Every structure is written in structure tokens, then in C-alpha cells.
Amino acid sequence: MCSYISKYCDCLKMHAKCQQEIQQQHELIIKLQEDLFDKNKRISELTGLLDKYQSVFNQPTSLSTPGVGVKSQKQQPKLGHVDSNEVFGFGGSLKPPILDSVVQTRKRGIGISAEPQNEDEIQSKELTKHPKSESIRKLIKNAHPRK
């Protein structure tokens, strides 16, 4: 009888250790998912900047936006939110990721920002005064709302 109680106590200890390890792994998964979200957000920001700069330099295509690229270029699989069960193979979608065999191309217009990029650039420019007739001055004055 004593051996059964001893085995039962050992099982309880092992169960507690397993529960603790599962909790630690769950916390790690949550932290890694948060890191992944932050990195995807940063990638989106950098992708936007890359598109902006490429449009200024008149690149024929942009590789940073989906649906835009060089013909015959293989596209990476598009993966959405991954459940922790899918990560460890405990279930989830049985469908493999769908790959587009060819990335579609499109022509992009040139976009140049008229906004100054930094404070020094603003201060280095002198304001140009343009002569206006008295009727234009009145029109401008009446167009602005009074405080």
C-alpha cells in the first residue's frame, strides 16, 4: 500500500512540474508572438519608406509591395497569424501555404514629396514675396476666417 502512495506522490510532483513547464512555454509563445507583431509592424513601416524612395528615384518596379515585382520572380508564401497549436503540429490548417508562381507587374507613377525633409532645409530657404494688387489683397483677407 505504501508503494502506491509513493507512486501517487511522485505522479503529483511530475504533474506539477509539467504544468509549470507548460506555463513557461505558453508565456514564451506569447512574448514571441508580441515580438513578431512588432517586427511585422517595423517591416511595414520600412516597406512604406522603401516605396516612397523608389518612387522618387523612378524605379520601374517595386519589390516591397505585394502584387508588384519583376515578372517570373517567385513570391514567398503568405502566412497569417499562427496559432500555437499549428506551431507545434498539434492541429490547425492541413492546407499548405498557397504560392503565386508569378508576381504580377504594374507601372507606378512618380511621386515626389514637396515637403522638406528636415529643419535645416526649411531654414535655408528664403521666402519669396510676390506683388499683389489691392483687389487680390482684399480677396485673400476675406478668405481667411477671423479668430
Image (cartoon, rainbow, N blue to C red):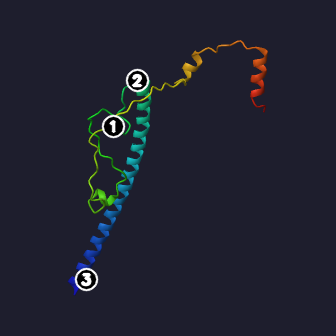
Along the viewing direction, whichever of 115 and 15 lies nearer the viewer: 115
Whether pointer 3 and pointer 1 mark residues with C-beta atoms closer than 8 Å, the reply is no
Q: Is residue 44 left or right of residue 145?
A: left
Q: Quadrant of the N terminus?
A: bottom left
In the image, 45 versus 51, the foreground residue is: 51
28 displayed left or right of 89: right
Q: Residue at x 27, y 77 (%)?
A: 9
Residue at numbered disc 3: 5
Return the residue at label 2: 58
Q: Earlier in the sequence, mark 3 or mark 2?
A: 3
Circle 3: is it few (<14), some (14-19), or many (20+) Cα within 10 Å?
A: few
Check disc 2 and give the amino acid type.
Asn
Q: Quadrant of residue 88?
A: bottom left
Task: Report x, y in % for residue 109.
Answer: 44, 28
- Give the quarter of the figure containing the C terminus: top right
Task: Name the residue tied to disc 1.
Answer: 104
Residue at 33% from the left image edge and 47% from the top image edge = 78
Q: Secondary structure at mark 2?
A: loop
Tell me residue 55's x, y (percent).
43, 27
Would residue 21 appear left or right of 56 to someone viewing this image?
A: left
Q: Secondary structure at mark 1?
A: loop
- Alpha carbon separation for disc pair 2 and 1: 19 Å
Number of marks in the rendered image: 3
* CA distance separating discs 3 and 1: 68 Å
Q: Specify which label sits upstream in the sequence, 2 or 1.
A: 2
Residue 89, percent from left and from top: 26, 60
Give the image quarter of residue 38.
top left
Query: In the depicted view, which residue is nearer to us: 64 or 22?
Result: 64
Three-letter residue code for mark 1? Gln
Q: Residue at x 44, y 37 (%)?
A: 45
Q: Which one is in front in this view, the residue at disc 3 or the one at disc 2?
A: 2
